[in-house]
Image: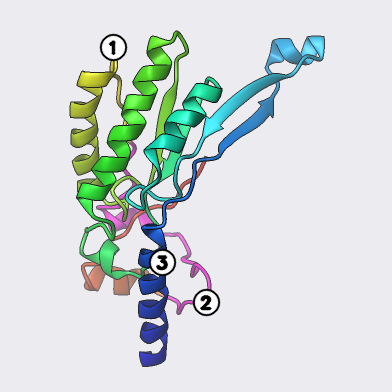
Amino acid sequence: CIRRFAWQAAYWEKTLRSAHQLRPVVPLARRYYTSQDNASGVFGVFRILAPTAILGYGFPKASFDAALDQARFDLIAVDAGSIDPGPYYLASRSSFTSLEHVLRDLQIIVEGMGKQIRAGHPCKLVVGSAGGCGTNNQVLILANALRQMMVHHLPEPTLATITSEILDLGILEGRSLTPLGPMPNVSKETLAASNSVVVAQMGL
């Protein structure tokens, strides 16, 4: 265990150092068909801008603005959490990234959305694992901050949240639990007895 924790500490020290070396934002485009396109055989393009791997890790505002100047985007997408730091942040319902840094990144993104919308191109934002660990309280913290930003930068702000924290472990009755990766098996009885924090995994 000591060796494992020492490895994790070294990994995160290296990761946090590299986070300050901001990398340029690279636009990502995905082709898709609509039903009408399928009939005509014409491609449509759905453009996605992913400014950073995780909110709070930082990215250059100049390259983000340059990406918006190059193309009109349909979606800005960013993750905000990871299981890599280990179970502490989930158990403590806290984020492993600084809220100040998260809000800095989010402010730039919301301003970019407003720029796209004012130019006549509706743009959406999707934030995964909102707040870092994905617990309900972290989603609420980020949603409240986002609402305040949207009022100042978006003409008709609309916000939806999806929470995944399982507050009633009774819904696990009759279900089998499978470890995620090389981890020991955990029984439902152990979860119930240890006041564990449990969130559901989901994806798009």
Q: Earlier in the sequence, mark 3 or mark 2?
A: 3
Residue under circle 2?
182
Q: Earlier in the sequence, mark 2 or mark 1?
A: 1
As drawn, 87 above or below 40: below
Left or right of 69 on screen, residue 82: left
In this rendering, which labeled residue sits more in front, label 1 or label 3? 3
Q: How is the image coloured?
A: rainbow
As drawn, 178 above or below 55: below
Prevalent SS, magenta region: loop
Q: CA distance from mark 1 to mark 3?
A: 37 Å
Residue under circle 1?
155
Disc 1 marks a residue whose amino acid type is: Pro
Disc 3 marks a residue whose amino acid type is: Thr
- In the image as oriented, which residue stretches furthest toward the bottom? 2
Locate residue 131, reporting x and y percent: 28, 48
Q: CA distance from mark 2 to mark 1?
A: 48 Å
Question: SS for tag 3?
Answer: helix
Question: SS for tag 1?
Answer: loop
Locate residue 40, reporting x and y percent: 80, 9
* Residue 170 colored in magenta in the image: yes
Q: Earlier in the sequence, mark 1 or mark 3?
A: 3
Name the foreground residue: 62 vs 175. 62
Q: Crowding at label 1, few (<14), some or many (≥20) Cα neighbours within 10 Å?
A: few
Numbered mark located on residue 15 in the image: 3
Question: SS for tag 2?
Answer: loop
Residue found 27% across the figure and 69% down from its top:
88
Residue 18, quarter of picture: bottom left
Q: Which residues are magenta?
A: 162-185
Name the foreground residue: 76 vs 115. 115
Can residue 187 be seen? no
Name the foreground residue: 70 vs 111. 70
